Image (cartoon, rainbow, N blue to C red):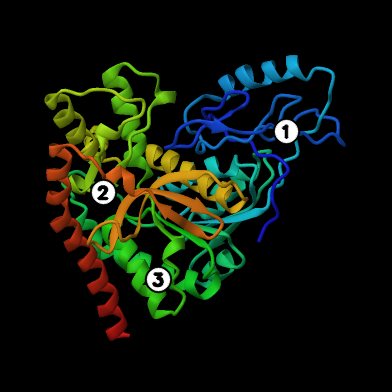
Amino acid sequence: MAATSAATLSIGTNVSLGRKVGSLSQPKPFGVRFNSQNSLKSFSGLKAATSVSCESDSSFLGKETIAALRGSIALKAQKEYQSYQYHLQPQAAFKVAILGAAGGIGQPLALLIKMSPLVSALHLYDVANVKGVAADLSHCNTPSQVLDFTGASELGSALKGVDVVVIPAGVPRKPGMTRDDLFNINAGIVKNLIEAVADNCPDAFIHIISNPVNSTVPIAAEILKQKGVFDPKKLFGVSTLDVVRANTFVAQKKNLKLIDVDVPVVGGHAGITILPLLSKTKPSVSFTDEEVQELTVRIQNAGTEVVEAKAGTGSATLSMAYAAARFVESSLRALDGDGDVYECSYVQSDLTELPFFASRIKIGKKGVEAFISSDLQGLTEYEQKALEALKPELKSSIEKGIAFANKQAVAA
């Protein structure tokens, strides 16, 4: 596994000098590290400002812009440490594979991950059209080496020695199409890809984006079990987009600074199974019953909002790529030794009677370290009823995924 980096820089995160903010946690102290043996000029890939190396606990592209990061942190650091010169030296050390890298989510996701100073190699896989994507990205002056892999014959090579596997592969949702309509196609795609992961990088963190996530994550779990390599701590359903949307919509509705807003989202990753816990919003804010209803429904139906707005030309690809990149960066920071990484994710869980459940978790070097059970305590009556109402649908989706995987095993 990779060595701890000398310095990391998260793009667009909510950091201020001398503070560290978790993606869903209260601010905690953090350090600014310097390497006094080198003179600092710049990190060519991300144009890091001179004289400062920052570690932020917020997620990739979390809350502030690059300009704000440069302006607010670099200027303060230059004033305080103007008598010193140091060299920003991120240690790109992790290999990330994107399976479905030529698609609508895969391409912007690959670009965002290419920007991470923690990535040493970016493996792009798809059944076609990936070579051009890789060539294009390889021109970006960031540390990671970009390699392309096309077709089933090269899938194994794409996965060898990889630390994090991200799977956005599959068909997108179109107008009038439900998440269930996606099932038969995407379930088979996920099954084949997970089999290859099990054979080539069974210890990697696995990030499932392919919809319907409520079913594809259980499918992945069953396939890994059949292969004898299932580690529930390392299998994640990427539900980060629900959190990103919740934070955005709440900030807009209540006229709050987005940098300050954290809304945990639990349940699943489709329709009514998406439950934003607005009562747990940080900073604490009050909502009328009408606002709770309006915000909850909008967060649940935000994907449909994008599908309809694109009028048949696609689904939520850019926001999904953004959210997935945030989750990937959080995973990389956890692998790199950051002990304070929190995200919401759809994982195998014992928080409820359901075998899989999305909630806020702590991520460490070995995957899921803890479930934040306090989020499910002290819910409002509306939230408690919504939680009970989502369980039958989520249970059905989980069972559907498990049944598909087992049926495929019997057929084989």
Q: Which residue is mark 2?
A: 173
Amino acid under disc 3:
Asn
Q: Which residue is mark 1?
A: 44
Mark nearer the N terminus (1 vs 2): 1
Amino acid under disc 1:
Ser
* Closest to the observer, 374 or 262: 374
When asked about the image quadrant of residue 306, the answer is top left
How far apart are labels 1 and 3 at the CA level? 39 Å
Q: Looking at the rendered structure, which numbered label has been put on residue 192?
A: 3
**How many numbered marks are there?**
3
Q: Which quadrant of the rendered structure holds the N terminus?
A: bottom right
Amino acid under disc 2:
Arg
How far apart are labels 3 and 2 at the CA level? 20 Å
Mark nearer the N terminus (3 vs 2): 2
**Residue depicted at x 19% and y 46%:** 271
* Closest to the observer, 82 or 158: 82
Say left or right for 148 vs 42. left
Tag 3's secondary structure? helix
Q: Which quadrant of the rendered structure holds the C terminus?
A: bottom left
